[in-house]
Amino acid sequence: MKVSVVKNILAANDRLSQENRELFDRNSVFVINLMSSPGAGKTSLLEAMGRELGERLRIAVIEGDIQSTLDAERIAATGLQAVQIETAGVCHLDANMIRSSINDLDLAALDLLVVENVGNLVCPAEFNVGEHRKVMLLSVTEGDDKPLKYPLMFKESQVLLISKTDLLPYVRCDLEKIKEAARMINPQIRIFPISTYTGEGLAEWHNWLLEQAGQPSS
Amino acid sequence: MKVSVVKNILAANDRLSQENRELFDRNSVFVINLMSSPGAGKTSLLEAMGRELGERLRIAVIEGDIQSTLDAERIAATGLQAVQIETAGVCHLDANMIRSSINDLDLAALDLLVVENVGNLVCPAEFNVGEHRKVMLLSVTEGDDKPLKYPLMFKESQVLLISKTDLLPYVRCDLEKIKEAARMINPQIRIFPISTYTGEGLAEWHNWLLEQAGQPSS
């Protein structure tokens, strides 16, 4: 009974997700679903994207938070357009929430839409929102055993950003072990080690985004 | 409809949780539900408890993981008794899972039972498992805005361990801001800043545990 309810919820979500995707395609906007544990650096990444790509791509952010508008305020400060979803306790964004918030955006005037999911390494991976690509962050402070312990998000994502590499000297974390485990779960996953603090890896990540959004990379 | 299903699930969980709690009380075992984001240091904390308290308290751990038995192996290596629950994708432990795993433990021979929940700062806070106290970790690498963004776990927990304080010099995180925000949400919350790397704060945390488990503190 419980299982069939869950299945129905996921099937309904997939239908709505497909409708969102068609809407994005009609408007030629490239959409990523950005996911990670709390505090892995999603919002800092968006701040860097605002600074570095804001002149070349028309970017908007749908900001998912359980409570508070702190992140939307940080995003808006970079000049990117930000729409806030407060989930009121729900641990992930779903296609219906995205559908409702799209009305606040002029999709035809966008190149890139980033859906910043709720900080949670588990549940968001189960819910498509209509995105073209799932992009996840794992910070080096979380430890190199995480792909094996939380495999679904690594399996579902097309890109893994290994964040906070500036902290590698101070933590017990083997970068190669993360890459190896992630590729064991998902051989096709693209991996970019990055630090928004030192700037390491951001150029490669931004070039990937420019290519995906149909712009010549620098 | 969806809401009423969720309500029924939570009500059923609360009934089972109450039964678990009565079982724990009959056997005079003190039970904590240990929760945090992935990689905040739950298992390292248990390793330290095994080293420092293993001679004074009879401790067992119920280890919740979505997949893998990596943590149970780490715990067993410290000499503590460990029982593994693999949730097969489920993002939290519930009272029924704990009930099933209790059969593998001799409760009458224990002083302290630690339920190490799935790494997730959201969902575990909604499900009582029969614990006497909820104890959460927040690592300083997650950032000082987390109490305001993920308030439920801070509200439900009796103890907040602020972990990885050895990394404070390298991250943008204000310890006082975490404490202030946590106390705004939950004025009664006990807060221990700790580092399993330097040992900071562990004596205070272990004394609290000894007191709660009815042993004289050192």
Image (cartoon, coloured by chain):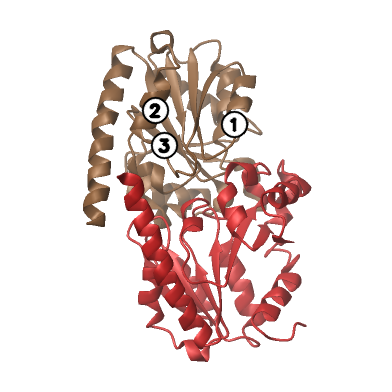
Chain colours: A red, B brown
CA separation in Å, label 2 and label 3: 7 Å
Whether B151 is drawn above or below B114: the answer is below
Is residue B145 visible in the rendered image? The answer is no
CA separation in Å, label 3 and label 1: 15 Å
Q: Residue furthest top?
A: B109
Disc with the residue nearer the chain's start (2 vs 1): 1
Disc with the residue nearer the chain's start (2 vs 3): 3
Crowd class of label 2 (few under 14; some 14 to 19; many from 20; radius 10 Å): many
Residue B98 image label? 2
Q: Along the horizontal axis of the image, is A208 left or right of A37?
A: right
Residue found at x 39% / y 61%: A11
CA separation in Å, label 2 and label 1: 17 Å
**What amino acid is at disc 3?**
Leu
Q: Position of residue B150 (x, y in %)?
A: 41, 53
**What amino acid is at disc 2?**
Ile
Q: Which residue is mark 3?
A: B93
Q: Which residue is mark 1?
A: B69
Q: Position of residue A102 (x, y in %)?
A: 41, 80
Residue A100 in which image quadrant? bottom left
Q: Position of residue A66 (x, y in %)?
A: 38, 59
Disc with the residue nearer the chain's start (3 vs 1): 1
